[in-house]
Image (cartoon, grey):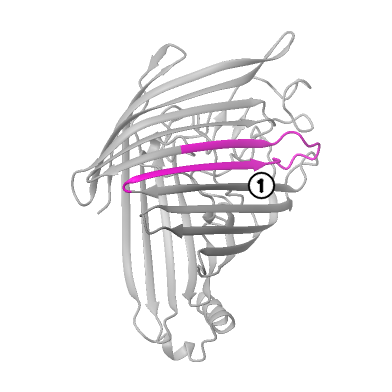
Amino acid sequence: MTLAITRIAALAVFGMSNVPNAMAAPIDWDASAQLDLLLSGAAQDAAFEETPFVGRLSAGFSGEHVFANGVNLRVAFGAVAERDHPRHDPRGGRAGECPATSPLCPNALGRNVRGYFSGFTPNGPIADTAGRVALESAYVSLTGGYGEISIGRDEGAAARFSAVPANILLGGSLVQPKIDVTGFGGLAARNDLSGQSFKITALTPRILGVKLGAGWTPVLEAQGVDQGFRRGADAPTVARPRQIAEFGASLEHDWPSGLSAHFSGSFATGANGAGPGAFGRLSAWSFGGGLERAGWSFGVQRLGSDNGWRGGKRGYRATTASIVRQNGAWSVQASGGHGRDSLVQTPLSTFSLGASRKVQKSLRLLVGMTGVRRAVPVLESAGPVATREQSLAIFTGLSFTP
């Protein structure tokens, strides 16, 4: 099946006339892996908490072949195993104590709700498990003079054109942390509506600094360790889009002075699939950009979504910014951001500071701190009250890439 799809895509997009013979040539195979480990302690609402030892192992396997006309065929697979903070349900987790049985609390037809991008829910179990394993990618792509086309489980077009600021802090990142050292989650800033679902994505080559992309995802599937939806009878309900269309554009420019700039924007939308009647079409957009010069880089990103809520005015907004200084083996970063998920009545502010040093070709050490402050709905006799929660975590760790 994969070989058939590859031949059709090659003939249709790249005009290849001798694919069967070219496929007989050898394919160069390659394997990669990255291990991230973090050890941290956090002060949460003036009480110190020794957070668990957390880690993330990602591994990939790929094969490439370059045809005589220069077209590159790539087959790739990637998996991730992680042990995260127990409170970190993928993307967010529980934020507050406001049961859906009260009409004053966030609910959809009497059921607990969850923000699509933030992942926060105001009630229910804290988390399912701290350990997760998932197949993150499995795709076939062709790249040539007319651009790139990929088929399979991979990043969507909108996610590829999200200008998320640079990050050197692994789990200490304030933007969708891969490993969460506070348990309070982080700001979602990438327009990743389709996650790791099966999709078709097409990208143009960069012409005069401009690159375009589009993609289509027929069905939203299980989305990986950081994006999956919690299952079970007590799981909060959330928008479940299908037939997702994604679009993106970016512009890059370099000046003789050494200054370079990049800007990008994206839009994604999907019809209501398995979500309840309170949800409808889900749409999201993002824009951002950055500057780089002489070891300095600065970036800012803005993400917005309607959460798929039919009634309107229950959307999600987040803005993040980051500045990074690289000098030899050292990198230093400062980041900040603020967002609000109106569907679950939860605003969130974050910051992070940290430094990283490359001590060997394959080993990088880091140390830093990250802070999270949020206001969550707690049901009291007079109704929901915004209750402030905050956490400040100090962490150290390493990143190893064989």
Identify which residue, 39 or 208, lies in the foreground: 208
81 in magenta: no
Residue 124 seen anywhere in this rendered image of the structure? no
Tag 1 secondary structure: strand
Image label count: 1
Amino acid at circle 1: Ala
Identify which residue, 76 or 371, lies in the foreground: 371
- Does residue 387 sit above or below 2 in this rendering? above
Q: Which residues are magenta?
A: 294-321
310 in magenta: yes
Residue placed furthest toward the front: 257
- Does residue 242 sit above or below 332 in this rendering? below
Image coordinates of residue 175 in percent, x first then y, are 48, 38
Quadrant in the picture for the C terminus: bottom left
Residue 37 seen anywhere in this rendered image of the structure? yes
Image coordinates of residue 132 in percent, x first then y, are 45, 42
Counting other residues with Cα less than 10 Å from the Cα at mark 1, is it few (<14), some (14-19), or many (20 or more)? many
Image coordinates of residue 186 in percent, x first then y, are 50, 33
Identify which residue, 77 or 16, lies in the foreground: 16
User: Which residue is depicted at the point 81% across and 36% down?
Assistant: 311
User: Which residue is depicted at the point 41% across and 49% down?
Assistant: 80
- Left or right of 397: which side holds 117? right
Identify the residue under disc 1. 284
User: Which residue is depicted at the point 73% across and 44% down?
Assistant: 275
Residue placed furthest toward the left: 360
